[in-house]
Image: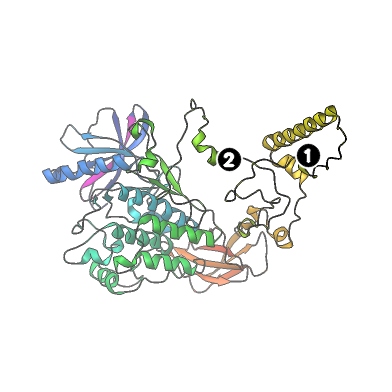
């Protein structure tokens, strides 16, 4: 702390525990709330900052965070008020883990974790933008970590409306775009997109994008590099070139060259996850202005709770929530009713008997073995399944009388067989049609494809140990699941962050030169196809 914290205020229903941090406008303290009993963080405006304008900004921050804090990646606001000594305060969710800036300075983030955090925070920023709010100070220090290890964006103290173009007060230089230093300064949604990209870069590199280790990094130096230099490469062998491309576009000098929105940036990160065979992190968005189709017909949407919308990765079959109207939801008491006007639509969704002619499998379904296809919904469905009585042409009349009883019985048996077949299809679906229609044999390419998604997970190295012999430090490890083309990426980790990454095909390394008493390395297993494991750290 650059100064001692102010004295904590006496708050009814709260017991003071300890200081948490001090800033230029406010201090943060840890309290215990009596009812319900829980630990909370209380942000208190400094006494010498209590002016009409500062008090209004503090109130605005409380209102903005309260409006957005139901989002899983935004710090929750519980209440706000004015203490007995006249200082305004906010009662917020307590996030006990170090913020992302503190952690990034001490240890590197894996590519998988940096992508996950970037997508989750981008969802929070997109939610704020849809509510008409710019954050304008996105940086690792303003991303706290909850007890459940989820990122939580905070500090909306200098937030403004998305229409702002001339405000930049309170910006943090290392994560600010060039237009923030223009005359006059400009800001907009793409300003926050730049800061998002710079934040993800910091998590991966252990430093802000234009900070140079061992060189001068004054404010003037950083501003000059931000305005003139291209985005430096990450220098991590476990980071694909596509990720560098995504970050470079997010931090483009010209705002028009960046991603148009935070959700577009998040989708680009999802594509990198797919490329690396990682699980895809959903984008959580709370839309403050749903369309009439999204609100539904019940009570004109006035009592409908806003939902968190999970957006699938771009390229999936389901359209984005930005353009797809939600389907009407039925309460438990709703009963479906037959609507004659919609009968043609219902007909297209009913299960029909399979056609005898096999249909070639679709390429997009190569990993699932399908029986011969049902009649396509885009084609008109047959009026009724073929009955056996129509399979042969009627015999020509030879003038002899046909017994009436025998003809009547034949028609009854034929009709009963058709009914039984139709009921069986509707009740048992594929179970009965699979017994009637020969199944297509899987092709060689289908049977050769992997069926176990767990096989795509790359295991971490095991038995990572280190030894010291005088000034020489060595580390060795094992490969729990060796495969052809395996290699290993390692880097030394210091208090300044991860060092230069190296690649080797051996399972042991020796660090050249002298090293401090505590020396740490991180090792990642990399497959020949580019997939990589989580990093493992060991110190000696």
| Occupied quadrant, residue 290 | top left
**Residue annotated with mark 1:** 389
Q: Answer with left or right where residue 499 lies relative to residue 57.
A: right
* Residue at x 78% of width, y 30% of height: 412
- Between 524 and 250, the one lying in front of the other is 250
- The outermost residue toward the front is 399
Q: Answer with left or right where residue 144 lies relative to residue 511.
A: left
* Residue at x 45% of width, y 71% of height: 235
Distance CA(mark 2)–CA(mark 1): 25 Å
**Residue annotated with mark 2:** 347
Q: Answer with left or right where residue 391 lies relative to residue 157.
A: right
What range of the chain is rendered magenta?
A: 23-33
Alpha-carbon neighbours of circle 1 within 10 Å: few (<14), some, or many (≥20)?
some
- Between 102 and 357, the one lying in front of the other is 357
- Determine the secondary structure under disc 2: helix
Q: Answer with left or right where residue 170 lies relative to residue 92.
A: left
- Between 175 and 382, the one lying in front of the other is 382
Q: Which percent across, then down, holds residue 359?
A: 68, 55
Alpha-carbon neighbours of circle 2 within 10 Å: few (<14), some, or many (≥20)?
some
Q: Which scheme is used to colour this image of the protein? A: rainbow
The stretch drawn in magenta includes residue 503: no
The stretch drawn in magenta includes residue 32: yes
Which numbered disc, 2 or 1, marks the residue that appears first in the sequence? 2
- Determine the secondary structure under disc 1: helix
Q: Is residue 482 above or below residue 349?
A: below
- Magenta segment main secondary structure: strand
* Residue at x 62% of width, y 60% of height: 363
| Occupied quadrant, residue 86 | top left
Residue 287: numbered disc: none
Asked whether residue 540 appears in the rendered view, the answer is: no
- The outermost residue toward the top is 333
């Amino acid at each position: 702390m650059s100064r001692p914290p102010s004295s904590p205020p006496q708050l009814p229903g709260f017991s003071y525990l300890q200081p948490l941090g001090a800033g230029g406008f406010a201090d943060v303290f840890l309290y215990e709330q009596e009812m319900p009993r829980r630990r909370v963080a209380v942000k208190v405006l400094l006494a010498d900052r209590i002016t009409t304008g500062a008090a209004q900004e503090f109130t605005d921050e409380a209102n903005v965070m309260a409006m957005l804090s139901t989002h899983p990646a935004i710090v929750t606001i519980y209440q706000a008020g004015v203490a007995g000594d006249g200082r305004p305060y906010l009662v917020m969710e307590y996030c006990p883990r170090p913020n992302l800036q503190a952690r990034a300075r001490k240890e590197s983030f894996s590519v998988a974790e940096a992508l996950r955090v970037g997508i989750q925070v981008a969802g929070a920023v997109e939610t704020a933008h849809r509510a008409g709010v710019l954050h304008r100070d996105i940086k690792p220090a303003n991303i706290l970590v909850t007890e459940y290890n989820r990122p939580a964006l905070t500090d909306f103290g200098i937030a403004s409306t998305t229409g702002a173009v001339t405000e930049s007060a309170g910006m943090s230089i290392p994560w600010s775009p060039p237009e923030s230093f223009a005359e006059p300064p400009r800001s907009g949604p793409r300003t926050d997109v730049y800061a998002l990209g710079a934040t993800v870069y910091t998590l991966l590199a252990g430093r802000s994008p234009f900070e140079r280790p061992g060189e001068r990094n004054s404010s003037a130096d950083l501003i000059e590099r931000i305005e003139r230099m291209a985005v430096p490469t990450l220098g991590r062998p476990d980071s694909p070139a596509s990720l560098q491309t995504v970050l470079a576009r997010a931090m483009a000098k010209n705002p028009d060259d960046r991603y148009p929105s935070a959700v577009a940036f998040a989708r680009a990160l999802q594509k990198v996850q797919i490329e690396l065979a990682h699980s895809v992190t959903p984008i959580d968005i709370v839309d403050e202005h749903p369309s009439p189709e999204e609100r539904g017909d019940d009570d004109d949407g006035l009592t409908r709770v806003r939902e968190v919308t999970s957006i699938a990765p771009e390229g999936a079959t389901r359209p984005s929530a930005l353009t797809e109207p939600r389907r009407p939801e039925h309460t438990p008491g709703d009963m479906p009713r037959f609507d004659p006007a919609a009968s043609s639509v219902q007909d297209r969704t009913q299960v029909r008997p399979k056609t005898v002619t096999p249909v070639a499998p679709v390429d997009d379904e190569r990993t699932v073995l399908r029986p011969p296809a049902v009649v396509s919904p885009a084609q008109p469905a047959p009026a009724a399944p073929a009955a056996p009585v129509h399979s042969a042409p009627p015999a020509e009349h030879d003038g002899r009388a046909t017994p009436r009883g025998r003809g009547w019985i034949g028609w009854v048996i034929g009709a009963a067989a058709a009914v039984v077949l139709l009921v069986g299809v509707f009740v048992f679906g594929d179970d009965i049609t699979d017994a009637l229609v020969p199944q297509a044999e899987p092709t060689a390419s289908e049977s050769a494809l992997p069926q176990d998604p767990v096989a795509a997970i790359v295991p971490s190295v095991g038995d990572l140990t280190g030894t010291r012999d005088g000034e020489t430090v060595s580390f060795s490890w094992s490969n729990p699941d060796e495969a052809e083309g395996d290699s290993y990426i390692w880097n030394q980790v210091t208090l300044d962050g991860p060092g230069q990454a190296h690649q080797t095909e051996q399972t042991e390394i020796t660090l050249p030169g002298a090293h401090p008493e505590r020396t740490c390395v991180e090792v990642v297993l990399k497959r020949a196809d580019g997939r990589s494991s989580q990093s493992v750290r060991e110190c000696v």
